[in-house]
């Protein structure tokens, strides 16, 4: 099983300027993001570093930082200090939603590490595939792939990055919690230096200290204070768990309800939808909720229904649940126009 984001670099201008480009496109850069012309820099999805295109936001931010530092050093002509900040590659772990299906990969996804072992769990009924790669001794997680259910991605990615020891039964990481088995991992096991938000380089220690010192009580306040989750949004689950953990330590009652209309978490609602074969929002609200729904639960349930049954999202029972982008099957721009990226067979 293999999936990847296909990025086609826009390098037409570079070719016109006779800059060096890769065989399959992309502007060739060095460790300082300089092109073959040392006075020109390239960053982001157009840049080719060691024959690789980095099509994620975090590597782009790192490239921008490196390029800015190098320009600053070079501008100070009398200073002979050489810039220590270099771009040497980036972690390409990512979580996506493809046609309504969660897909995630992290670390060594194809067991290339010598002696590595695989744990694979495939559930045809729920439409999920989960693979973990562990080291030969079975003590550390090296990587993995999640398809159909990416809820464990954030924590698994952190376990790889921070070399957190595996629990006695590694399969528990990708299985529902079983009776008699207490989970031995969670946000509390992460070191304060763990990078929670890679887009803005925000650590666990920064988030937790901000929550305690500023007495933050909700995700919006954490976002505003720390800049976490203001980039790609992939850190939202971990930031939420950190907030709940700190509030519990402070003696504040924490509820995991999705919103005022559903006294369940998102994961609990997903299980209700799958086990009871619920196919519409109205049916779920009638059986397990109250009121008419809101801007929080409607998009969440729409995503759950799409993941569970893969119905066309603009069918009459689902159309009213979609946000603006999904309703028009496009991305709304600041000027009110919409952009559409056509799907072409073969990439």
Image: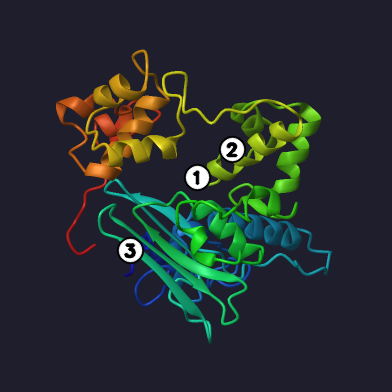
How are the colours assigned in the image?
Answer: rainbow
Task: Give the residue number, with chain letter if any, for mark 1.
Answer: 232
Residue nearer the viewer, 47 or 132: 132
Residue at 60% across / 81% down in the picture? 137
Residue at 55% across / 63% down in the picture? 40
> Alpha carbon of mark 1 to alpha carbon of mark 2: how far?
15 Å
What secondary structure is found at the residue carrying circle 3? Answer: strand
In the rendered structure, find residue 240 and report the number of the disc placed on it: 2
Q: Is residue 186 left or right of residue 289?
A: right
What secondary structure is found at the residue carrying circle 2? Answer: helix
Report whether residue 278 is seen.
yes
Tell me if residue 239 comes above or below residue 158 in the rendering: above
Residue nearer the viewer, 347 or 63: 347
In the rendered structure, find residue 122 and report the number of the disc placed on it: 3
Tally of numbered tags: 3
Residue 114 percent coordinates (x, y) = 53, 86
Tell me if residue 49 comes above or below residue 252 in the rendering: below
């Amino acid at each position: 099983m293999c999936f990847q984001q296909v990025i086609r670099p826009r390098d037409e201008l570079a070719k016109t300027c006779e800059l060096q480009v890769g065989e399959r496109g992309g502007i060739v850069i060095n460790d300082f993001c300089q092109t073959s012309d040392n006075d020109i820099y390239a960053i982001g999805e157009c840049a080719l570093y060691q024959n690789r295109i980095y099509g994620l936001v975090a590597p782009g931010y790192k490239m921008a930082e490196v390029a800015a530092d190098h320009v600053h050093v070079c501008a100070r002509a009398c200073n002979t200090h050489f810039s220590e900040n270099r771009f040497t590659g980036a972690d390409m772990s990512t979580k996506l939603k493809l046609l309504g299906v969660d897909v995630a990969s992290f670390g060594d996804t194809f067991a290339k590490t010598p002696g590595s072992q695989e744990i694979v769990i495939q559930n045809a009924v729920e439409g999920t595939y989960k693979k973990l790669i562990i080291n030969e001794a079975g003590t550390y997680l090296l990587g993995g792939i999640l398809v159909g259910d990416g809820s464990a991605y954030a924590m698994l990615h952190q376990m790889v990055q921070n070399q957190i020891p595996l629990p006695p039964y590694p399969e528990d990481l990708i299985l529902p919690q079983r009776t008699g088995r207490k989970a031995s991992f969670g946000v509390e096991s992460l070191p304060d230096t763990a990078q929670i938000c890679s887009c803005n380089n925000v650590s666990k220690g920064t988030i937790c200290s901000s929550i305690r010192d500023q007495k933050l009580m909700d995700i919006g306040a954490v976002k505003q204070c720390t800049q976490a989750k203001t980039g790609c949004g992939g850190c939202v689950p971990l930031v939420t768990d950190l907030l709940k953990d700190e509030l519990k330590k402070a003696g504040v009652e924490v509820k995991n309800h999705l919103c005022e209309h559903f006294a369940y978490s998102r994961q609990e609602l997903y299980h209700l939808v799958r086990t009871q074969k619920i196919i519409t929002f109205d049916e779920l609200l009638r059986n397990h909720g109250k009121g008419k729904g809101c801007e929080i639960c409607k998009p969440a349930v729409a995503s759950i229904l799409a993941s569970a049954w893969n119905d066309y999202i603009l069918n009459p029972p689902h159309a009213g649940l979609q946000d603006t982008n999904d309703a028009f099957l496009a991305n709304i721009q600041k000027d009110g126009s919409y952009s559409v990226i056509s799907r072409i067979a073969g990439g």
